[in-house]
Image (tube, rainbow, N blue to C red):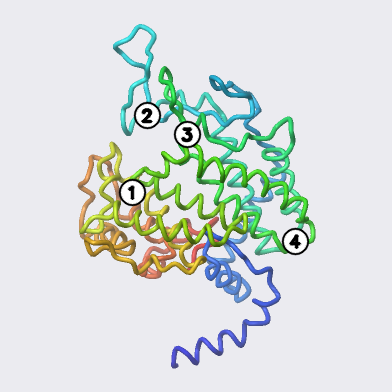
Amino acid sequence: MNKKIFLFLWLLFWAPVLLATNYPNTFVTNVDALLSNKVGILNGNPVLLKAKAQLIAEVEKILEKNERYSVCYDKEVPFKGSIHDYYSLSRYAWPNPETETGLPYVGRDGEVNPEIYSLQDSYMLGSVCNEVYKLGLAYFYTEDERYVNWIKELIKVFFIEEATRMNPNFEYAQVVKGKTNTGGATIGAFPLVYLIDGIQLVQTSKNWEMTNQDEIEKWFEAFFDWMLNSEKGKNQGRAPNNIGTYYTVQVSTYALFLKKYDIAKDILLNQGKHRVDEQINEFGELSFELKRGNPFEYVKFAVTSFDLLMNLSSVLGVDLIKYKNSKGTGVLDVHYWLLPYALGDKKWDYSKEKVSKNQIAIVLLRSNLCECSKYFYEQMGDLSCQVILTQLFFKI
């Protein structure tokens, strides 16, 4: 059948359903994937039905757990900071073996100091973002208002209430003990873009009120200002690796959420191509990430950052997907670089990490950009199901 005729018939059949649904005005989550998956669920797709059931089981556990989050709970206060400031330690900083006090801490790239887990703010922020996002997804697929009500409670405690709210800055994120003027590592704030999409997914709910929107927007207005204008924020924006890409993803998303559409587009126009220029080499490799102590972990992380960036480019009408840098490569070339490793034609030899072909295939399978994702879905069976069980925003 002619492709255009098929598309017309598909739209004709499903248009009433799509028009009746709560349209997902998301920023880093692929809207087409959300709509396609919702139709697939209505059409009885067994993998998507299984994924929906798993998602609902997870959010029901969130409601049953009844746990609220705050950076003020069980708190160690940062030097010069307050109980309301987000506080974490540098992941790869260790006590200095050459000093009696162990200060200042020194870096060991790729070796995580377990001391970081003594501070809970990273867990608190990650948990509230993860749960709001899952609750938002669950609401999109079910329109169950209980999920919206719990989103409101989580946001009220973490961002709004005077006693428990987080200050809108990252001044003390990933501090190196014994050194002054450290912190400000905005990479730890990137889960906030998912929290925003969780909020976007409940915009049509009768229980999501204008006061809820105004309160959370005030917080993000202040955080957006810190990201753009503080010295530590600006410094993060100059990072040439995944830190820089996630910075661009964050500030673009915050601007969109605050309805600063022209600013969001300007940010993406000015920074988006620059990220492709400086990070992707002539072979499609992510050069900066390959220099790290455990490069595959960083490659995975960086691929996700570019996926999010490309979704934002679609939302804002900035064509970064086809953009090629002066070396002749773009974002899709990163996927083509990884493809032979995912197929088992090549073995990962950039480090001593034991990386299987399935681990690399999952990176591609998770991407809405990769033309190979459907191939992997068809070929990998149960592994594909595992990947999308709680990831209903990925297109099949």
The disc, 4 or 3, on the residue closer to the chain's N-terminal end is 3
Task: Look at label 1 and name its amino acid.
Answer: Val
Looking at the picture, tell me which residue is in the foreground, 44 or 101: 101
The alpha-carbon separation of the residues under discs 4 and 1 comes to 38 Å
Give the secondary structure at mark 4: loop
For the point 75% across and 61% down, which residue is it? 205
The disc, 4 or 1, on the residue closer to the chain's N-terminal end is 4
The alpha-carbon separation of the residues under discs 4 and 3 comes to 35 Å
For the point 51% across and 42% down, which residue is it? 227
Neighbour tally class for label 1: few under 14, some 14-19, many 20 plus, Cα within 10 Å: many
- Contact (Cβ within 8 Å) of mark 4 with mark 1: no
| Foreground label between 2 and 3 | 3
* Residue beneath disc 1: 299
Task: Look at label 2 and name its amino acid.
Answer: Tyr
Can you tell which quarter of the image residue 376 is in?
bottom left
* Residue beneath disc 3: 184
* Residue beneath disc 2: 92
Residue 195 position, x and y percent, is: 60, 50
The disc, 2 or 3, on the residue closer to the chain's N-terminal end is 2
The alpha-carbon separation of the residues under discs 3 and 1 comes to 22 Å
| Foreground label between 4 and 3 | 3
